[in-house]
Amino acid sequence: MDVLVTGGTGRLGRLVVERLADGGHRVRQMSRRGTGPGGVRGDLATGRDLPMALAGAEVVVHAASDARGDYWEADVAGTRRLVQAVDRDRLRHLVFVSIVGVDRIPYGYYHAKYAAEQVLLASGLPVTLLRITQFHDFVDQLLATARRGPVLPVPMGWRLQPVDVAEAAAHTAEVALGAPAGDVVEFGGPEELTAADVARAWAAAREPNAHVVATPVPGRLSAAVRDGAAVPTRGPRGRRSYAEHLRG
């Protein structure tokens, strides 16, 4: 298969590229500069070179995103430009990498991801919206950032189901080579944990002097996560637990 991966140099994308290439598929990774093995130029922010990058692609894995920048431009308008530039005569499947909870958690970046999903559902293309839970190493980063000296405060009652990024990449590649779902599918880790559970495990493994404090957090976002909006309701699960991740 001829596969194009947007965001192919990111945490998930590079592993998806490796998985597909190991399976014998011709894989191109799109970026603004087109650098790296199999690199092709294409700019979602402007539309520049997109038709050339997408020409001939039978499968597109759309993993590009900009959580810290102008995500309405990058994720929503960029997805719209991708839809306009895709080779409809060749395309068999477009997989959009999204996040579990984008339809329920009131957070700006999530609103943008959900809007991008709607662009794809309205496009008439053969699509699958693949929502994945948070990666183990991303959870590590959040906890390291949250620590305040000897204290590690975490939101009380938040429910999480973190997943191994390599397992998520393998599942993404498998979904991409399968039939389009035409709707949302989910993938998450093997177990549901509270934020306090995760923080205590992380502290024991990485920062044994940190004291975890579960703190009530008001607001609609916090209520949604407490109610399980970040936890998958269906679909397959990974096998590697967060504890196994911490053991390395």
Image (tube, grey):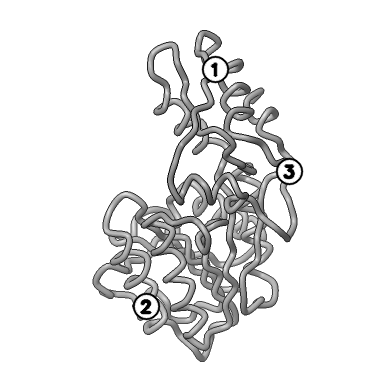
Q: In which quarter of the image is the C terminus?
A: top right
**Spatial distance from mark 2 to mark 1, Cα to Cα?**
42 Å
Q: Name the residue under label 3.
A: 190
Residue highlighted by disc 1:
206
The residues tagged by marks 2 and 3 sit, at their Cα atoms, a distance apart of 34 Å
Q: Residue at x 48, y 72 (%)?
A: 117
Where does the image place residue 199, in percent across and percent down from the top left?
Answer: 56, 26
Question: For the residue marked with disc 2, what is the amino acid?
Answer: Arg
Quadrant, the N terminus: bottom right
Looking at the picture, how far across and down is residue 28, in whole percent? Answer: 47, 65
Name which of mark 1 and mark 3 comes first in the sequence.
3
167 to the left or right of 219: right
Q: Do the numbered discs 2 and 3 sit on residues whose CB atoms are within 8 Å?
A: no
Instruction: Categorize mark 1 by other alpha carbons within 10 Å: few (<14), some (14-19), many (20+).
Output: some
Where is residue 124 shown, x and y percent of the image? 52, 88
* Image position of 121 (left or right of 77): right
| Residue ID at (53%, 19%) | 212
Q: Which residue position holds label 2? A: 80
231 or 144, which lies in front? 231
> Earlier along the polypeptide chain: callout 2 or callout 3?
2
Residue 223 placement (x, y as % from top left): 52, 47
| Residue 220 vertical position relative to residue 46 in the rendered view, above or below | above
